[in-house]
Amino acid sequence: MRSKLLLLALTILYSITFAGAQERIEYQRIYLSGKDAASAVDWDFKVSNGRKAGKWQKIPVPSNWELHGFGIYNYGHDHSRKDRTLGKETGQYKHSFTVPASWDGKTINIVFAGSMTDTEVKINGQLAGEIHQGAFYEFKYDISKLVRFGQENLLEVKVAKHSANESVNRAERQADFWIFGGIFRPVYLEILPEAHFSRIAIDAKASGNFEALLTTNIPLEKANVNVRITDLQANSELGEFTASLQGESTIVKHDFGKVETWNPENPHLYQATFTLLINEKPVYIQSEKVGFRTVELRDKDGIYVNGTKVVFKGVNRHSFFPTTGRALSNANHLEDIQLMKEMNMNAVRMSHYPPDEAFLDLCDSLGLFVLDEVTGWQDGYDTIVGPKVIKETILKDENHPAVIVWDHGNEGGWDFANEKWFHRWDIQKRPVIYPWLNRNGVDTFHYPIYKDGINRLSNGQNIFMPTEMLHGLYDGGHGANLDDYWTDYMKNPRAAGGFLWVFADEAVVRTDRSDSLDADGNHAPDGIVGSYREKEGSFYTIRDIWSPVQVKPMVVNAHFDGKLILENHYLYTDLEGMQLCWRLKTLTNWEGQESESGEVTLKSILPGEHSQVSLELPEDFGSKDWLEVAVKDKSGRLINTWSWPIPSPAEFTFKQLAEHTDAGEPIHIEQGTRTFQMGNVKVYFDADYALEKVERNGQVIPFSGPVFINEVSSKATHVHQDEQGNYHIEVEYEQYPSSIKWTLYQNGLLKVEAAAPDRSQSGKPYVGIHFDFPEEQVAGIQWLGDGPYRVWQNRLRGARFGAWQKDYNNTVTGYSSLGKLEYPEFKGYHADMFAYRLSTDSGDFSVYTESPGLFFRLFTPAESPYITDGLRVPFPEGDLSFLYKIPAIGTKFHSAKDMGPSSYDRRIVSHHGDRDYPITLWFDFR
């Protein structure tokens, strides 16, 4: 009896389950692969050539097969190199999946979100459709008649890395980026009712006007659609309407009135739910995210979104990660967008192909303008493949409010005859631009030098927006001269901003080379961040320059009254309600200690306006060392931080070394040896009274100098002792510096004064004095000044005044064959020095300065073997320098002198009677 009851219960349960499955009418997606690279599913795989060729093994899907030990690595330029083997291997995949019997009668599509490159798909031994060509595009096949319901089914996929269509190879694989093979984006099934929408294309305007082009898979009679709009942020319904459908395609319209519009500063999203009704019975439901926004290109004026002229603060982004190639995880997408937002960017260009669906979803929800690009690096698709991939791009990405511009290829990667297909398929009629050209009303010229162009760019009449600018090879470009470019561009009301090249270094893990990193020479290390998203120096420069809240330049000293002027550089956002936080800090034991702090809730400051804000600073403000001010938006996200020293370097040094003239043990001189004993410190001079070395308690500190660029002897030397018992040594030279004065104090301090720079130093790349110290003995540094990153003459913004520390490293920015890059880089030029303590194997010693605006230099950074001339920056002789002037850096394509005023030579001007600033240093070896 119990067995009969159990059988009856199971039968009822099966019937309920089957009925539920039959009645399910909403859009369904069933993944056969992982949803992303982090959740990949193993399929059977065999590759025809290269590593692991000819044997069936397992491979995760999605992935690029090179990263899993198969096939041949190639960079896009390899096609023209005789010393490289161009991989043209084919990969074969097999995967079994079960189709429930309950799906019988439904439409079953198999969807490939991206497969490199020519892809043939078979279900149970039968072709699903024509071979798809084009690596970066979503394509699908209706396999309803090929699957076996209630049984296991066999999926077979053949992927040819090299396309049979030569225009595909020229557009995608003969390019300046890594080219891989494999199914690198998800594969899934769409399970749809017998009647369903095959396309939903939405055009939701900022006015509240809503249009949708609805296409059904079969002609329908007596069919309607109900459209319901829900506010996802407010969790409330905006409204709904019902319209009749005519034929296979119908445009439905409704005016929802006042809506919250979408923009990157407030990415307000709604959900549109479309219910297909036949004879008033719902047969299919599909939902789409919606952002109400209007895009206009106004000729010789600007690109407007929601009636506001847009300035793009953008970057180019490759879909890339070193361990997975172009197969990415959702965490990869999120990290990239968060880093862009941290740099105060509002836009991203998809270079040079449409991105993953997940990336655009995040751009919609977190807020970034997107330039969506059809591939074509410097050659375009023909008129056979081109129209197909344009259609696939638009149908995949058309409903994302973040996508506001279509890019038709890159730098020659187009056939103008194919442009009409953008207008044919895009119901929103978004602008179509040609990155590199002055066409369709937008001048996008790549890598302009400063003030470039006759009647072009900032000198022209068209909208201008370089879609690649300030090439960031190694540590050049990006932040260097960005301030100049931006200041110049913003003077022209036709400026629509620009896009830096590029977001991240593209160094791939070579599984065929012991997992070393390879950026193909200088072709791919162009990032603001490293391959693993390490922040480089320009990251902070960009954040500062593109901060939507700016502090008007001001003087901070002991007399500062706490008043500062804030400027609102947002496009859409009032500063009202944002938080300004201030902190006062002092240097204690080489660390910044906070003494007082406060907050100000900002009042209304509209975009384009400025207003004065007062800080309630304490009466003893002038006794502190520096002031920090930070602004956070209403969500608590940090927008930017500014900081200013309060004392001058001399005031700070006198406070730190208050006892510098106190008498100590009388200085002992070893007769005839130019050796001075000051307490536990002993200093040795050579015959020209340059420092040879220092001893502390008998241990040698190998600090010596000054070091001269050319061999030079002293012209005259004067040595005398003052009434306090301190010794003064003045050495005169025939070249700069004309004199150096040493003062040896009885308490062990050593003071050096180098004569102020004279006109003989005009035209020199650096001006200052230099000393020797063995690099191999250095462990780290703590300092008060700008940091933590090094600077160039044309990249001073972004480094922030404060107390900093970093350990020694030998990082060559963007270059490593071993995968070891440590940031901030230790070596190089650093700005606004007040003091530092160098940690060495011989013990620590400290240096203070009285000179304002002084740079210090730590050794000479190594260069990548693939460096270009524009990035070769001069460094002085010696190891440790103290400088009034440092050089600028260029880019991969241009020398610094072409990049704007920040790179121009700083001429030395003087007049008889001027009170110049010598370089004054205090060395504490005690």
Image (cartoon, grey):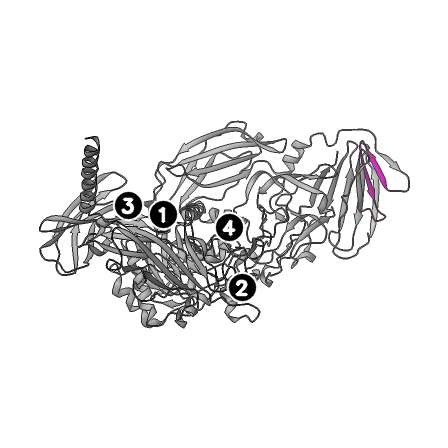
Q: Earlier in the sequence, mark 4 or mark 1?
A: 1
Image marks 3 and 1: residues in contact by CB distance under 8 Å: no
Marks 3, 1: nearer the viewer: 1
Q: Earlier in the sequence, mark 2 or mark 4?
A: 4
Pick the quarter of the image with the C terminus. Answer: top right
Mark 1 → mark 2, Cα distance in angstroms: 33 Å
Say which element carries label 2: loop
Q: Which residue is mark 4?
A: 529
What segment carries the magenta color? 674-690
Q: Which residue is mark 1?
A: 362
Say which element carries label 3: loop
Q: Earlier in the sequence, mark 1 or mark 2?
A: 1
**Farthest residue in the front direction?**
1
Nearer to the camera, 48 or 465: 48
Nearer to the camera, 173 or 677: 173
Mark 4: give few (<14), some (14-19) or many (20+) Cα within 10 Å. many
Mark 2: give few (<14), some (14-19) or many (20+) Cα within 10 Å. some
In this rendering, position of residue 497 left or right of residue 5: right
Mark 4 → mark 1, Cα distance in angstroms: 20 Å
Q: Amino acid at mark 4?
A: Val
- Residue at x-position 61% and y-position 41%: 806
Q: Amino acid at mark 1?
A: Leu
Q: Which residue is mark 2?
A: 893
Q: Which label belongs to residue 269? A: 3
- Where residue 899 appears, as percent x and y from the top left, is 53, 60
In this rendering, position of residue 840 left or right of residue 485: right
Mark 3: give few (<14), some (14-19) or many (20+) Cα within 10 Å. many
